[in-house]
Image: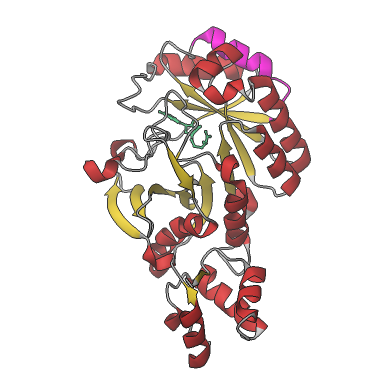
Amino acid sequence: MSKKEIFGMNLEELQGAFGEFGVKKYRAMQVFRWLYEQGVTSFEEMTNLSKADRELLSANFNLSSGSVQVIRELASADGLTNKVLLEFPDKSCVETVVMHHDYGYSVCLSSQVGCNMNCAFCASGISGFERNLTAGEILAQVYYFQRLLQPKGARVSRVVVMGSGEPMLNLDNVLHALDILHSDYGQCIGYRNMTISTCGVIPGIAKLTAAGRTINLAVSLHAASDTLRTKLMPINKTYNYLKVIEAADAYEEGNGRQVMYEYILLAGINDSKADAQTLADTLQHRNCVVNLIPANPVPEKGFARPSQTVIDDFFQTLKARKINVTLRKEMGKDINAACGQLRANTLRED
Ligand code: SAH
């Protein structure tokens, strides 16, 4: 029988798994801390466990957190963004990005290998959908960077689930991982410092609302009408524009967190002043912020970013209508680590 994987288990799951082998309950908390506070990758490093217990655990359990392989690593010229292509034991790969902000380190996590949402402008779905990531694999992306930061006395203090994949289609595993990161005996990251970005999968938004965490919700809107949104994002046929916004309203009401609407600016497609006005018509009186993302180049997709004047005009039009608006800080564009540029396999071929 193959050994049970423990990386990704929460405290109760560790207690249950160890209990079957007669390992004392308090050991589960010790192991939890070694895994998620210290980020160790082997049972031998868990030095407050007896040798017998360490041997028992390694004979019966697998600890794969250290077995992710770095296939490739890229650093942006300004040194603030690092992207890695991580490979899991089944050879699936995902990209993960760490960004150094003035307030600390933020990791952009992938939730799936590939993606099947087929948004017209995004790189993540180009080679299709492979599979969901497990909670352990989501955590492994954070701990890969945490282990590098720890010796410098630094830590990952913020996570955004905005890498490849649609997190609402893998919400159980995403939440399981975020809850572990939130734990005082894990990375102790406040839910307010976590963001999940969705293309608008309403059942997932509703489930997150019901989960009652103060996690930030970001919704990829990208168009101010159903016709255009459907062209850009096929998911709009199933969950349309206004319904998505209503689901986000319910999230804001239930969880007390201002919703962020992401809006890519695609030259000549959704960037006119009229588009900005229509967007403002929909969002005025809502507790939200619009985050404008000038399109990042994805060669296969052929969209262009608007000129700076057009970007500024769009921004000012929203501002004049009293909409909270921000322009996304661009990081890592020179290494294709910016929004929508993450993909599963091309780094291998570069
Ligand atoms: N599936 C989720 C999370 C991944 S995408 C979602 O759709 O929100 C993270 C953000 O990057 C989204 O807002 C996405 O629409 C945006 N994005 C995708 N392709 C992009 C591109 N070429 N340029 C700029 N942003 C892009």
**Looking at the picture, how far across and down is residue 109, in whole percent?**
47, 48
Quick check: is 276 in the magenta stretch?
Answer: yes
Q: Is residue 110 above or below residue 62?
A: above
83 on left or right of 225: left
* Closer to the camera in the image, 258 or 208: 208
**Total tally of numbered discs in the picture:** 0
Which residue ends up furthest to the top in the rendered image? 274
The quadrant the C terminus occupies is: top left
Which residue ends up furthest to the left in the rendered image? 350
Magenta stretch: helix, strand or loop mostly: helix
Q: Is residue 66 above or below residue 216?
A: below
337 on left or right of 29: left
**Looking at the picture, how far across and down is residue 330, in whole percent?**
40, 35
Residue sitting at x 37%, y 19%: 303
288 on left or right of 340: right
Q: Is residue 206 above or below residue 36?
A: above
Residue sitting at x 47%, y 69%: 39
Quick check: is 245 in the magenta stretch?
Answer: no
Q: Which residues are magenta?
A: 272-287
**Looking at the picture, how far across and down is residue 178, in whole percent?**
59, 55
